[in-house]
Image (tube, rainbow, N blue to C red):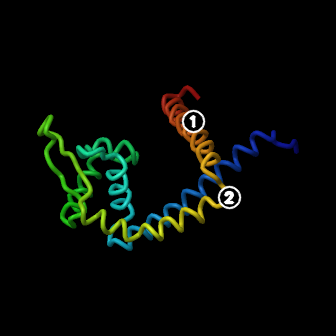
């Protein structure tokens, strides 16, 4: 049996490493969510809103795009997060048909209680990587993410 090319092996190793990392990070998100009495998707939505908000609130479409999930799911879950007083949902001042969401002070307080644990976890996750190495890795991963979206589109339309 002929030996597979080294690049093929490296690609397969990379993919399995990504699968493993994704699985572990998913478990970590579940743990953070449980500490706040949330589901993992609610935690991710809350984090996405916190990340995307630049002071004017964030649209459900922006959150859905960041998380690669359906906007209707975002709407459903953000209504629950609003009931729990983790989010505010207000009509956009530019177009009242759209809702802008922001993380509340209550949610920020709860999240900040986790900050020491999150910092320790991040230190463990990225042990051995300095800022420059992490920046380099993020640039490469961003490129791979873009390429994977393009490859997925090509596969969907039958080009590959």
Going by the picture, which residue comes out furthest to the left? 96
> What residue did someone put label 2 on?
128
Say left or right for 94 vs 28. Answer: left
The residue shown at (38%, 57%) is: 44
Alpha carbon distance from label 1 to label 2: 23 Å
As drawn, is 142 to the left or to the right of 68? right
Quadrant in the picture for the N terminus:
top right
Mark whose residue sits in front, 1 or 2 = 2
Mark 1 vs 2, N-terminal side? 2
Question: Dot 1, crowdedness within 10 Å: few (<14), some or many (≥20)?
Answer: few
**Residue found at the very far right of the displayed protein:** 1
What residue is at 80 percent from the left and 41 percent from the top?
A: 6
Q: Quadrant of residue 3?
A: top right
Query: Where is the C terminus found, in terms of image quarters?
Result: top right
Q: Position of residue 92 (x, y in %)?
A: 16, 41
Looking at the picture, tell me which residue is in the foreground, 86 or 8: 86
- Label 2: few (<14), some (14–19) or many (≥20) C-alpha neighbours in 10 Å: few
The spot of residue 61 in percent (x, y) is 29, 42
Q: Residue at x 64, y 48 (%)?
A: 15
Helix, strand or loop status at disc 2: loop
User: Which numbered disc covers residue 103?
Assistant: none
**Disc 1 secondary structure class:** helix
Nearer to us in this view, 8 or 82: 82
Question: Against 53, is 35 above or below?
Answer: below
User: Percent x, y for residue 59?
Assistant: 25, 43
Q: Residue at x 36, y 42 (%)?
A: 65
Mark 1, residue position: 143
Q: Position of residue 124 (x, y in %)?
A: 60, 65
- Tell whether label 2 touches label 1 (CB within 8 Å): no
Number of marks in the rendered image: 2
On the image, which quarter does residue 31 sit in?
A: bottom left
């Amino acid at each position: 049996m002929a030996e597979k090319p080294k690049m093929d092996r490296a690609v397969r190793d990379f993919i399995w490493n990504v699968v493993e990392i994704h699985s572990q990070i998913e478990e970590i998100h579940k743990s953070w969510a449980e500490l706040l009495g949330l589901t993992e998707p609610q935690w991710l939505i809350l984090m996405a809103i916190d990340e995307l908000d630049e002071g004017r609130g964030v649209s459900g479409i922006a959150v859905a795009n960041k998380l690669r999930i359906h906007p209707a799911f975002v709407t459903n879950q953000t209504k629950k997060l609003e009931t729990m007083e983790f989010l505010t949902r207000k009509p956009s001042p530019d177009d009242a048909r759209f809702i802008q969401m922001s993380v509340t002070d209550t949610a920020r307080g709860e999240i900040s209680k986790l900050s020491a644990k999150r910092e320790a976890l991040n230190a463990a996750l990225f042990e051995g990587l300095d800022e420059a190495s992490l920046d380099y890795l993020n640039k490469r991963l961003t490129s791979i993410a873009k390429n994977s979206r393009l490859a997925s589109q090509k596969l969907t339309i039958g080009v590959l």
